Image: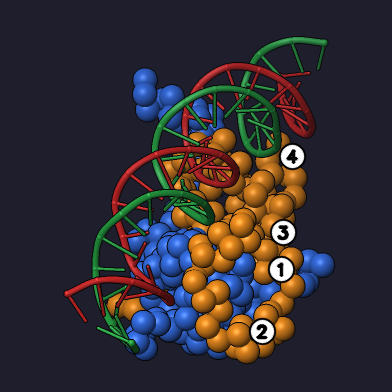
Chain colours: A orange, B blue, C green, D red
Amino acid sequence: MAERKAALDRCDTIVIHEDVVNSVRDRMPPDENLYDLAELFKVFGDTTRIKILWALAESDMCVCDIAALLNMTQSAISHQLRILKQARLVKYRRVGKIVIYSLDDDHVKQIFSQGLVHINENR
Amino acid sequence: MAERKAALDRCDTIVIHEDVVNSVRDRMPPDENLYDLAELFKVFGDTTRIKILWALAESDMCVCDIAALLNMTQSAISHQLRILKQARLVKYRRVGKIVIYSLDDDHVKQIFSQGLVHINENR
DNA sequence: TCATCATATGAACAGTTATTCATATGTTCA
DNA sequence: TGAACATATGAATAACTGTTCATATGATGA
């Protein structure tokens, strides 16, 4: 009964084009890869992080300056930098009391520009 | 007092490299563009939507088949398709009772592949 | 060593979001 | 027209996420 219920939730006929579904399923990458891909884009999916990355693409900066640039608290920036660090998108170096962050990925700019192309094409 | 408080939240010295901050600020795109960019990546930042887009890159499909392929309810897929539609990433055509979805953007694949490059480089 | 300052981080909270359930819409065919 | 079916959608809920606040960590220089 539970099976039948699940099928009904999808569609009464369950699958309309079974051959297409099977063929596409065969060509889909492993779930893990698609999950990782979504996780990466999730990191890009926040205005603060986009701004930080864009700023770092212009110049290496310390946490304090990024906070001033974006007019946000040091804490908020620091939390976001941690996420960017975990995603291996930024790296840092200590210079005395200061920690200077910089981009750690050449593709960031390319991914951004592709995104902008989409945005600009749709108005 | 409130001003001084806000400054303290950032850093006591407020700005360490004022010249750098100002120069980067001048070169930053308008907030609106960065917001739109984040919104676009937010759409990519969900496993279900990534899977749908990837599937549609392989073949046009109806809602029912996508649900079967991903083993999810028709309702869940339909909700996500609405989001993809709003982002102008997919389009649809009616064929009788069935609605067939397809990709509406040539850059999707390129954005995905850039993302994969990043993932693969970092193991 | 102590005061100062830049940064990091845990906990809490508010806002967002993906899925489910129930139901509505719109098409086909008898 | 009415039954059957594919899809869409509103409301509710649980899980997630970004910011704030308070505080910890780590470095400097007196």
Q: Earlier in the sequence, mark 2 or mark 4?
A: 2
Q: Residue at x 65, y 49 (%)?
A: A83
Q: Earlier in the sequence, mark 2 or mark 3?
A: 2
* Quarter of the figure with the C terminus of chain A: bottom left
Q: Earlier in the sequence, mark 1 or mark 3?
A: 1
Q: Residue at x 65, y 53 (%)?
A: A84
Q: Earlier in the sequence, mark 4 or mark 3?
A: 3
- Give the alpha-carbon distance from disc 1 to disc 3, as whole Å: 21 Å
* Quarter of the figure with the N terminus of chain A: bottom right
Q: Which residue is mark 4?
A: A96
- Give the alpha-carbon distance from disc 4 to disc 1, as whole Å: 44 Å
- Give the alpha-carbon distance from disc 2 to disc 1, as whole Å: 16 Å
Q: Which residue is mark 3?
A: A88
- Give the alpha-carbon distance from disc 2 to disc 4, as whole Å: 59 Å
Q: Image quadrant of residue A59? A: bottom right
Name the chain letter of the residue that bears numbered label 3. Answer: A
